[in-house]
Amino acid sequence: MTAPLSSKVRVLVIDDHPLFRQGIRWSLESTPDIEVIGEAENGQEAIKLTERLMPDVVLVDINLPGLNGLEVARVIKRREPRTGIIVLSVYEDDDQLFQAIKVGTAAFTSKDISPEELVQMIRDVARGRYLINDAVLARPNVAARVLHQFRELAATDEEDGANLFAPLTSREIEILDCIARGLSNKEIAQELSISGQTVKNHITSILSKLQVNDRTMAVIVAIKKGWIKMGYSQLPE
């Protein structure tokens, strides 16, 4: 069983339907370790609220007017890389899932998720888990597209002297390799026999050194530079 969080998870809800936002708020208000700190009905408002309120987790509808949910997620992850993002969709579409991976979201789910499942998802994302990895491995078509993109990036040859060495420590390389295999922070800690906080500290250092905003991009950069190798041989070509 996952250990309880030390403080309340601060959640921002982004959806253009007031009734749906209220439904989520009602579902979460009875949960003692989760607090809804704000709501937004469009992308621009969501980005401003995120910068002002600094939520731990953002729930965002993929079909927002103006900036859609994926565009909002991309901006938030670039500006606030530590914020976990859960994308909500009316239906689970392979292409939407693939795009959600690319912008660094932590989870992607249909709107018919139960309140209990949503609560657990929020807790997991707040702890640093990337549930979207599980969704990818369960969808062969999406897994194949992700693997294909990784391979294309790894095959790119950049003749830049600054890229001839890895700016990461051996431990950071190990952690990136674990991330590439889809392990959560807790699983990485168990595999490497270190604390969860140490894992988080290393990931923060990795993102800073590679000048990227999320774990997915860190893995892509590391594969592209040849510092780690993909091990998803079981996935379809």
Image (cartoon, rainbow, N blue to C red):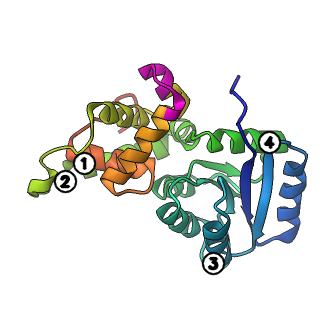
Q: Tag 4: residue type?
A: Asp
- Secondary structure under badge 4? loop
Q: Work out whether mark 3 precedes mark 4 in sequence or the reverse, and give the earlier one.
A: 4
Q: Work out whether mark 2 precedes mark 1 in sequence or the reverse, and give the earlier one.
A: 2
In terms of secondary structure, what is the magenta stretch mainly?
helix
Q: Which residue is mark 2?
A: 156
Q: Which residue is mark 4?
A: 33
Q: Residues within 10 Å of mark 3 (few under 14, many from 20)?
A: few
Residue at mark 3 to residue at mark 1: CA–CA distance: 33 Å
- Secondary structure under badge 3? helix
Q: Is residue 22 within the magenta segment? A: no
Q: Which mark is residue 57?
A: none
Residue at mark 4 to residue at mark 2: CA–CA distance: 45 Å
Q: Residue at x 58, y 55 (%)?
A: 83
Q: Residues within 10 Å of mark 1 (few under 14, many from 20)?
A: many
Q: Residue at x 79, y 57 (%)?
A: 36
Foreground mark, 3 or 4, reads 4
Foreground mark, 3 or 2, reads 3
Q: Which residue is mark 3?
A: 44
Answer yes or no: do the residues labelled 2 and 1 have beta carbons within 8 Å? yes
Q: Which residue is mark 1?
A: 224
Q: Would you say residue 145 is visible in this rendering?
A: no
Expressed as whole percent of the image width and height from the top left, the position of residue 140 reads 49, 39
Foreground mark, 2 or 1, reads 1
Q: Work out whether mark 1 precedes mark 4 in sequence or the reverse, and give the earlier one.
A: 4
Residue at mark 2 to residue at mark 1: CA–CA distance: 7 Å
Residue at mark 3 to residue at mark 2: CA–CA distance: 35 Å
Q: Quadrant of the N terminus?
A: top right
Q: Residue at x 73, y 55 (%)?
A: 11
* Drawn side of residue 185 relative to residue 234, left or right: right
Classify 198 as above or below 145.
Answer: above
Q: Which residues are magenta?
A: 188-197
